Image: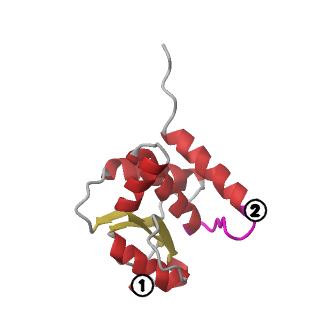
């Protein structure tokens, strides 16, 4: 189950988000586990980043594994407790990144969601270079599965 809560005025394609999350969960053999996805504004994202990571700046995505934070600490507590945790995304930062990296909003949104889910699954790019490369490889793999090149004929 993929639970989505948009606490912003921005629009998101919930079907696309569910398909993206499901692709990663299936690929990682975690199909059936709940993931909560919350969309929040820049102010709230800055506060979360400062509180949980000690960084007083806005970021595009944060991941909160359920076993580490407990249900009461979710930005938007899930209805069930059998989940991996919550991926929190700042839509404004996603839009900025799309422009910065000459990408599309949809691709940057998928990148953030995949990145967040991989963190929930225990991948950590900040641990060491080997772990970072492994996580990046997984992220690129899932992006390639979602944005498959269209046939030329």
Residue, far top: 153
Q: Is residue 88 magenta?
A: no
User: Which residue is rendered at x = 35% and y = 70% of the image?
Assistant: 42
Q: Is residue 127 magenta?
A: yes
Mark nearer the viewer, 2 or 1: 2
Residue 1 visible, this orientation = no
Residue 114 visible, this orientation = yes
Quick one: 94 or 150, which is closer to the camera?
A: 94
Cα separation, mark 2 vs mark 1, equals 30 Å
Task: Find disc 1 in the rendering and name its residue.
Answer: 73
Q: Is residue 140 above or below residue 40?
A: above
Task: Find disc 2 in the rendering and name its residue.
Answer: 129
What span is colored magenta in the figure?
Answer: 120-131
- Magenta: main secondary structure equals loop
| Mark seen at residue 144 | none
Give the mark nearest the N terminus, 2 or 1. 1
Disc 2 element: helix
Q: How many marks?
A: 2
Quick one: 34 or 7, which is closer to the camera?
A: 7
Disc 1 element: helix
Q: Is residue 85 above or below residue 145?
A: below
User: Which residue is rendered at x = 42% and y = 53% of the image?
Assistant: 109
The image quadrant where one finds the N terminus is: bottom left
Would you say 42 lies left or right of 82 here? Answer: left
Give neighbour class at mark 2: few <14, some 14-19, many 20+ (Cα, 10 Å).
few
Q: Residue 23's spot in the image, x, y percent?
A: 50, 49
Would you say 5 lies left or right of 33 here? Answer: left
Q: Residue 10's spot in the image, x, y percent?
A: 26, 58
């Amino acid at each position: 189950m993929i639970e989505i809560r948009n606490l912003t005025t921005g629009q998101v394609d919930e079907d696309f988000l569910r398909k993206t999350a499901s692709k990663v969960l299936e690929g990682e053999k975690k199909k059936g586990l709940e993931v909560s996805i919350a969309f929040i504004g820049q102010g709230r994202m800055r506060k979360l980043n400062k509180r949980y990571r000690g960084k007083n700046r806005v970021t595009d995505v944060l991941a909160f594994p359920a076993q580490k934070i407990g249900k009461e600490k979710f930005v938007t507590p899930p209805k069930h407790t059998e989940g991996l945790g919550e991926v929190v995304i700042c839509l404004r930062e996603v839009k900025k990144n799309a422009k910065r990296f000459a990408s599309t909003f949809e691709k940057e949104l998928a990148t953030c969601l995949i990145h967040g889910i991989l963190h929930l699954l225990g991948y950590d790019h900040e641990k060491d270079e080997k772990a970072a490369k492994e996580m990046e490889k997984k992220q690129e793999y899932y992006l390639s599965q979602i944005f498959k090149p269209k046939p030329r004929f």
